[in-house]
Amino acid sequence: MKTDAFTVSLALLGTLVIPNPSSLLRAATGTLTNTDGRQFEGDMTVVDPAAIRLEVAAGAGTVSYLFRKDKIQSIDFFDAEQIEEGLEALSHGQYEAAVEVLKPVHRQRSPFFRLYPLESLAEPSLALGEAYFQTGRFIEAVGVAGTLLGVDFAEERMHSKANQLMLRSFFKLERWEETEILAKRWCENHNPAEDSALGWWILGEARLATEDWKAARWISLLPITFSSQYPKPYLEQCYPVVIQSWLSEGNPKKALRAYREFLGRKLPWPEEKAALRTSMEEMLGEQDQALAPSSSEPTLEIPQGRPEMDLNLPLESVRKITAKTEISETP
């Protein structure tokens, strides 16, 4: 499955560049420990899928060693400070800085991935891919994801993250045919009741783009229907797809019903759908106003303040008031 995903992803992108032999000869500074426990420090270069050439400084020149994979115990790179700096920048939303720091780390490490398919070795590359995505460099993000998908990592997590990065990047590139193929594969490998709605949301968006309103709505409703009271990633993105599909079919009442349900779940509204939310808020206000109770009876006007009592009425005024009262009460 991993190889198929990588092959299909390359075919879909078309412009994704596989590292050529010259790029694989890029040296990375670090330490190599052989199976005898001896350590060699210098510039390491992958010369074929199963061998590393290491050049060690010796006097005024260098000494070159060739180590086969079965004679290597471990390799370590001198880039720990760079990685820490890049991850720190990424965590604080400083994506441009993260790209600048992590890009050379990826270039140095990526030739070693197939020789040593370790998650820990590739973590900085995954972080670089996310930084590329956040800065709008979606082609570069797909390139990093493709590199990771081409490596046979022991654990599935790295491929899962790389697939998500690739899917999100194709979606941002608005390449709907490729997006739909990748999103379908994602949905085939996930259950709508699981802890992410990513594939369902993006597949729904792809169907919206082709004006298949019913399919977009049905797909996006799946994770909503099977969701619990707990929030899960990308669920809030599914509601605008459902709402937009109803509006596009000329059914504002059902769109408003879905919007009310969204408000009841107290999910964050996606920023990129601000215009749709404005429209729904206007519709909500109009409906609430139409349903508000109304009456044609004039409102009772009550004078403000405490009435003053005149205790000094003239005798004639008192007699007139008394006479009027008596006349009105006479049958």
Image: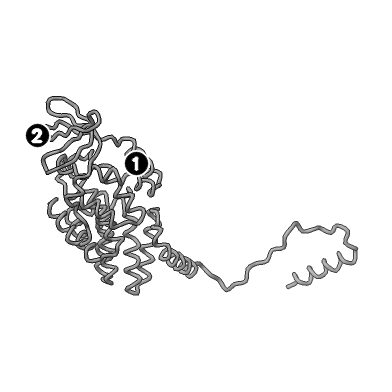
| Callout 1: SS | helix
Residue 82 as seen in the image, left or right of residue 7: right
Q: Residues within 10 Å of mark 2 (few under 14, many from 20)?
A: few
Which residue is identified by label 2?
70
Horizontal and vertical percent position of residue 70: 9, 34
Residue 225 as seen in the image, left or right of residue 331: left
Q: Amino acid at mark 1?
A: Leu
Identify which residue is drawn at 43% across, 65% down.
275
Q: Amino acid at mark 2?
A: Asp
In 3D space, how far apart are the residues under numbered discs 2 and 1 (Cα atoms)? 32 Å
Residue 285 as seen in the image, left or right of residue 14: right
Q: Nearer the viewer, residue 35 or 282?
A: 35
Horizontal and vertical percent position of residue 49: 12, 43
User: Which quadrant does the C terminus fall into?
Assistant: bottom right
Work out whether 253 lies above or below 228: below
| Numbered badge on residue 139 | none
Horizontal and vertical percent position of residue 239: 34, 60
Mark 1 and mark 2 in contact (Cβ < 8 Å)?
Answer: no
Work out whether 8 lies above or below 148: below
Identify which residue is drawn at 32% across, 52% down.
132
Q: Quadrant of residue 213?
A: bottom left
| Numbered badge on residue 87 | 1
Q: Residues within 10 Å of mark 1 (few under 14, many from 20)?
A: many
Horizontal and vertical percent position of residue 188: 17, 56
